Image (cartoon, coloured by chain):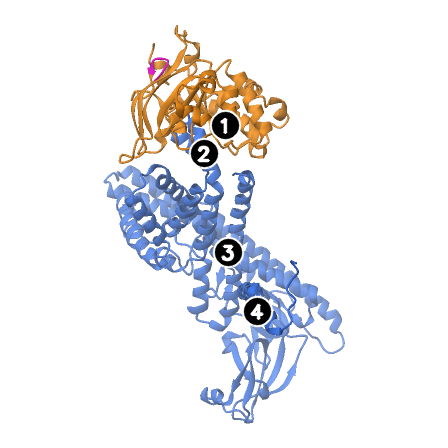
Amino acid sequence: MYKKTNTDSVREEVRQYFKEGDYGIAIFAACLGISLALVGAVMLLILVKGFAHFMPNDLHSYEVRLSGSETTLKIAGEVAARERITHQVLIESGYTPAVKKDLYERILLKNGNRELGRDYRWILVDDILAKEQDPDLTLIERYSYGNFYGTPQSIKPINPATEELSISYEEGEGGEDADRGEWQAKLKSVLRYNKKIRKEMAKLQSKKIDKINYRLEKIRLETNRLKIRKEATAEKLQELEAKRTELYAMAQEAEEQLVLLDDQLNQHELHMLTADGTAVAINFSQIVRLYQSNQLGFGGRSKVYLARLAEFVSGKPRESNTEGGVFPAILGTVMMVLLMTIFVMPLGVITAFYLYIYAKQSFITRAIRIAVNNLAGVPSIVYGMFGLGFFVYTIGGSLDQLFYPEALPTPTFGSGGILWASLTLALLTLPVVIVSTEEGLTRIPRHLPEGSMALGATRFETLWRISLPIVSPSIMTGMILAIARATGEVAPLMLVGVVKLAPSLPLDGNFPFLHLDRKFMHLGFHIYDVGFQSPNVEAARPLIYATAALLLLVVLMLNSIAIIIRNRLRESYKNLS
Amino acid sequence: MNKKTISGRETGKSNSINNIEKPENNTLITAEGLYLYYDNNEEAALKNISMKIEKQKVTAFIGPSGCGKSSLLRCFNRMNELSSTCRLEGKIHIQDQDIYDPEVNIAELRRNVGMVFQKPNPFPKSIYENVAYGLRIQGEKDKDKINQIVKSSLKAAALWGEVKDRLNSTAINLSGGQQQRLVIARAIAVQPQVILLDEPASALDPISTLKIEELIHELKKQYTIVIVTHNMQQAARVSDYAAFLYLGKLVEFGKTNDIFTKPRKKMTEDYITGRYG
C-alpha cells in the first residue's frame, strides 16, 4: 500500500523528481562547491605563487636576435613569466618581429646585473637562436643592485699588497677537478668569514650603537625639558653634558670598531663574466649568497629554498622592500592586532553587559543597539579619518603639549603610531564584539541567573560568576571575528601610523621595551606598497604573493589560537539546556 | 525583634536568624492584603491575599494555571522584583520582619528564603561548586567548613550516595531528578529558614518525583516549606496546609486534610475533584 508509485511514464518520473525536491539538493551542493572552489583557488594561488618564489630556478644562457637587425645578444638569467601576445600588440609596443604570425610567445627573462642595464627583458621565443643550460652559470644575490647572473672567473684579494694569490675558477682543461676543490674551499671560507663578521656588526649595532643613540636622544630631551621648565641650573646641565661626552666617546669607539669590521668584509672580490663577456668584479661584502642552481640537486635546491624563506620571514627589507625579509611587518601586524584585542575586548564586553543587563530596555537602548550594528558597516577609511583627527591630532597633540614638550616640534604621540592604530582598529571592531557578546547573553537560560539571585547573589555577583563564564565562548567568537577583521584592515592604518619602512621596531631591548608611539610596518600595507608603489614592479611581484601568503598564515595562526580557547570553553558548557 | 537579623550584612553573621529565640506562636510568614501588579495598567495578578504560614510545616499552593500561585511564592523572596515594572501592595512579614521594608537587604533575605525552580537549574560548574556557590557568595574561605557543609547538604538532599565519587564532575550531566535534588542541596547549603519550591517535580519522572516527595518529608523537620504544585495527589501527600488560589484570589486556606476531605467552598471542591482547572 505504501509502495512507491510505479512510474510508468517519463513525465511522471520527472514530476516525482521535482516533487521530492532532489533538484534542490543538487543546487545546494553546487553552490557549496562553487564557494569552496573559489576560496580554495584563492588560497592555492597565493600559497603556491608565494612559496614557490623561493625555490631556485634553472638558469639559462640565450643567444637572442635583436629587433630589426642581424646583431645578436648573449644574455643569461631565469624565466620569470611567460605569455602569448598578438601581432598587433607587439607592433604597438614598437617591436618588429622577424616573422609575421598571429600569436607570439614571449618570456620575461630576469637577467639581473642592474648596474649594467635593465634587469628584466621580454624576449620573443622566435628570436632565441640558441639556448644553453650552462652548469657554470652562477646566481649571486647581492645587498644592492639585485641579482647578478654570470660565470665565475676568480677570487682575488682586494689589497694587492697581500701575499695571497688569486684563485681561478677554471685553470685550463686538464686540472679542473683539483682546482675546483680549492675554489670551493676558498669560496666557502670567505663567505663563512663574512657571515661571522656581519653577525658581529649586527650585534654591535643593536647592542651598542642603537642603545647609545637611544640614550643620547634621551639626554637631548632631558636637556630641553630642563630648559622649558626653567630648571636648567648650570650644575644639572653640566652633569648631562658630562654624560653626553661619555656617550659620544663610547659611540666613537663603537663606530671605529664598526669600521674595522667593515674593512674585514672588504678583503676579497669575486671576478665574474656576464653572458656577453663583460668582466665585473663583485666585492664579497655585497654578496648575500650565491649558488649554481643548474648543478644543484633536489637536496641542494631545498637548502637554498629554506635559507631564502628563512631570510624572508626573519630578515629586514632591502632595496625599497623588493628584497630581503618582512620580519618588521610580521611583528608590526601581530603586535597591532594583540594591542587591538587588549583594547577592544574589555570595552566591548562591558558595553554589551551594560546594554543587556543593566540598561532599561527602552526606545533608546533599541536605538543604540541598531546604531552599534550599523557601525559595523561604516567604511574603514572613515574610522581612519576619525583616528587621525581624534586620536592622533587631538589626543596625541595634547599629550605632546602636556608631557613631551621637550621633543617638539618633533611629535611623539602627535603623529601616527602603533597605539593610535590599534585604538582605531579597536573602534572598528567594537561592534562585532558587542553584538556577539549580547547574542551570547540572550542565549543564557533565564533560570540560571535567577537561581543565582535566589541564593542571595547580587546582580554583579551573578554576572561575574554565572553569566560571564557561560557567555565566554560567545565573547571568544567576537574576538575571533575582531581579529580576522583587524588583521586584514589596511586603509585606516595608512592614516594612523603604518609606514613603508620603519626605522625601529615597536618592541626592542631599550627600556620600556614596548614603544607605543612608534610607527610600524604591516603586512597588508606591505603588499600594497611593494605591489603598487615599488620602483621595480617586476622584482616585487613574487613578493606580493609571498607577503599575502604570510598575512594569511598570520590570520590563520591568531584565529586558531582563539578558536582553540573557545572550543575549550565550549566544552564546559555544551550540555547547557 | 532586631531588624538587622534579616536586613543587615552589617551584623556580619549571615545565619544569625536561625539562632535567635523562637517566638511563642508557630507562625513564620504572614501576608496581609497583598496586591501584585506586573504592569501598571494591568489587572492585579494577586488580589487581597492574607495568610499565615506555619513554621516547619509544608504549605501547598494549588490552583489552575495562571491563578497566581507562583507569583505569590515569588513574593516571599522578592523574586518578582527582577522584572522592573512589578509593583506590590500590602505587607509580608517573616518573623515580624517586614521584608518589603526599604532597609531590608534583599540578598540577605534571599539567603534566608531559599528557592527551587520548576526546571532544574544547576550552574554549569562542578557538583561541588554548585553546592558551595552560596557559601562562596557569602565570602566563606574556610575550606574545611565548605567541605563539611557541601557534604551535609548533599546528604540532606539524599544525593550524597550517588555523587560522592564525582563531586568534581560537571553538574550538567546529572539526570533531571538528581539535578533537582542538587538544586535543593544548593539551597540548603546556605541554611535558610524557608524553602520555596516552585513545582519542583513537574519536569521529573515518577520515580524522581517520589524521591523529591520523600525529601520534602525529611526537610520539613528542619525547614519551613512552601510548595507550588499542579498535582493534587502530590499536594495531598506532602503538605500539612493547602491554599487554593483562583484568578489571583485566595479562595480557601486550611489544613490539607480539611481542604481535600471537606472543602468549605464549592469552587475548591470542583477543582479538587477535577471538574475544571
The residue tagged 2 is A447
A200 falls in the magenta region: no
CB contact under 8 Å: marks 2 and 1: no
| Marks 2 and 3 share the same chain | yes
CB contact under 8 Å: marks 1 and 4: no
The residue tagged 4 is A15
| Marks 1 and 4 share the same chain | no
Q: Which residues are magenta?
A: B93-97
Question: What kind of residue is marked 1?
Answer: Asn
Q: Which type of secondary structure does the marked residue at label 3 adopt?
A: helix
Marks 2, 3: nearer the viewer: 2
The residue tagged 1 is B231
Q: Nearer the viewer, residue B241 or A71?
A: B241
Question: What kind of residue is marked 4?
Answer: Arg
Q: Residue A322's spot in the image, x, y percent?
A: 49, 66
Which colour is chain A painted? blue
Rendering quarter of residue A236: top left
Q: CA distance from mark 4 to mark 2?
A: 50 Å
Say if residue A67 shows up in the picture.
Answer: yes
The residue at 53%/48% (across/down) is A563
Q: Nearer the viewer, residue B107 or A515?
A: B107
The residue tagged 3 is A327
The residue at 55%/87% (across/down) is A104
B95 falls in the magenta region: yes
Rendering quarter of residue A512: top left
